[in-house]
Image (cartoon, grey):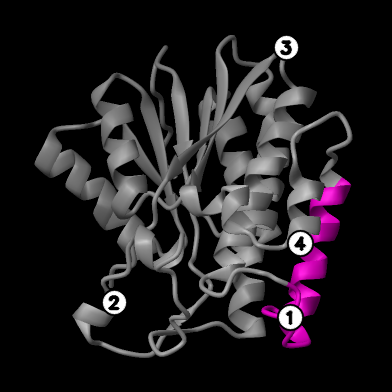
Amino acid sequence: MPEISFGSKRIAVVTGGNKGIGFEISRQLAANGVGVVLTARDVRRGTEAVEKLKASYGLSDVVFHQLDVTDPSSIASLAEFLKTQLGKLDVLVNNAAVIGSVFLTDDKEKLAIGPDDLIGPKAANKNQVLKQTYETAGDCLKTNYYGIKQLTEALIPLLQQSDSARIVNVSSQLGQLRVIPNEKAKKELVDGDSLTEEKVDNLVEGFLEDVKQNLVEAKSWPTNFSAYIVSKAALNAYTRVLAKKYSSKIAINAECIFMILLR
């Protein structure tokens, strides 16, 4: 790989940067003078995203690096690239995520799911549109929660060398505790001195066991997108734990969006 340099610019890593929110975050960072390492699982799609940023937006300080947040060797490869090629990291944007469900229809009207369909008195079971299995739920938590943890922990040593380090975890309004009917889970995730990473891990593992035993509704987990919702609630809790641990050196926060189902 040819030598890469962003000069004195701040450097940001954006996961899941090949499309959607991740692409727009990458574009805006680069447009504001930040050197961007855009990452994606798919090499072709990631490379095409970087080429588009350069050709269509005139942004030169953007490079691609393959990253699968569920693969420890892929994470290690990115960390080594940052250390040897760039020598530093100032911003980590954890955006990569999956919804944890399988589409059962191509009907666009049925796929037009918004906030009222998922939260509040009008919410209804969408099992005719989406299907969640133990496998899809596991993949969701592995990507949206465990993967973010593993990547963050691998890159914190580089971030600690920055004078203005920041971690942004892209979350969702669906990660709000009011979306989760399970009162015990909500109590465990409430912010406070007693919240620990181990407690969050245990809650996630308990949820996955309930999915495996087909006890999602019986245990008062959300009816729709339960794995996605739990993954984002867990991410929010982990963000608070992380912020306490590194408050003097790294600015850490979660940014919430609302996920509207699109294909």
Looking at numbered disc 2 in the image, what kind of residue is underneath it? Answer: Leu
Q: Secondary structure at mark 2?
A: helix
206 relative to 24, above or below: below
> In which quarter of the view is residue 257 placed?
top left
Q: Secondary structure at mark 4?
A: helix
Mark in the foreground, 1 or 3:
1
Looking at numbered disc 1 in the image, what kind of residue is underneath it? Answer: Ala
Looking at numbered disc 3 in the image, what kind of residue is underneath it? Answer: Ser
From the image, tell me which residue sits under label 3: 248
> In which quarter of the view is residue 157 placed?
top right
107 relative to 118, above or below: below
| Number of other residues with Cα within 10 Å of mark 1, as a class: few under 14, some 14 to 19, many 20 or more | few
Q: Earlier in the sequence, mark 2 or mark 3?
A: 2
Q: Position of residue 81 (x, y in %)?
A: 56, 40
From the image, tell me which residue sits under label 2: 111
Mark in the foreground, 2 or 1:
1
From the image, tell me which residue sits under label 4: 204
| Number of other residues with Cα within 10 Å of mark 2, as a class: few under 14, some 14 to 19, many 20 or more | some
